[in-house]
Amino acid sequence: GAGVSQSPSNKVTEKGKDVELRCDPISGHTALYWYRQSLGQGLEFLIYFQGNSAPDKSGLPSDRFSAERTGGSVSTLTIQRTQQEDSAVYLCASSASMNSPLHFGNGTRLTVT
Amino acid sequence: GENVEQHPSTLSVQEGDSAVIKCTYSDSASNYFPWYKQELGKGPQLIIDIRSNVGEKKDQRIAVTLNKTAKHFSLHITETQPEDSAVYFCAASIRNQGGKLIFGQGTELSVKP
């Protein structure tokens, strides 16, 4: 079946511009996660949505980062006033419940010039 | 919060040999430990996971062991094949409390034919 879909797959933007990254989770999955992976590094947790509960935003690195999940499905990660250090692969994952394994998309590679 | 340390960062083995990757975690409340395999340009894929009520789990050539007292867990791959070459990540989380996975830094495994 369809997996987690992320778009765009690649994004190049100029420093100072805003970007929006989109995640379509697996249908019916109630939990959705965003992670950031810098070159050659591990996965850094950013934010987590579970059903209708308030999201866990404890991993967002600054107030330039925000995310929303509309209708309990699609999620958008927004980075305002991008900086070069924001360059990374942004990965989205979903799971059927908080006790189920995470399924990752292939990520959006963001390059800030 | 939880901290996961993973080593080695790189591992090179000959085809047919075994490979072992080790992780330690800091939060004794963690009770779920998955391992992910990430190939170039792809998102991480779950290969095996273990919960804290068991000490070992096997799936064909892959096994994971968990020592709760020492707070460490390991991935064992036997009879390695070139297609096992990838980056492997361990992770830990407290299930039933949000499912947020904290990842290790990754191990780049190279299997030489």
Image (cartoon, grey):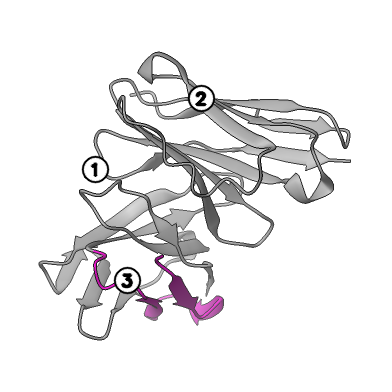
Instruction: Tell me which corner region of the image, top left, top right, bottom left or bottom right, holds residue A26.
Output: top left
Q: Which residues are magenta?
A: B1-30
Is disc 1 surrounded by few (<14), some (14 to 19) or many (20+) residues within 10 Å? Answer: few
Q: Nearer the viewer, mark 3 or mark 1?
A: 3
Q: Residue type at mark 2: give it.
A: Glu
Kindly identify which numbered label has been placed on residue A10.
none
Which numbered circle lies on residue A68? 2
Residue B24 relative to residue A64: left or right: left
Residue B78 visible, this angle: no
Residue where numbered disc 3 is placed: B27
Q: Are marks 1 and 2 in contact (CB under 8 Å)?
A: no
Kindly identify which chain the residue marked by label 3 belongs to: B
> At numbered mark 3, what does the secondary structure look like: helix, strand or loop?
loop
- Residue at screen point 39% across, 66% down: B2
Instruction: Label 1: state its secondary structure.
Output: loop
Which residue is labeled 1 in the image? A100
Report helix, strand or loop for mark 2: strand
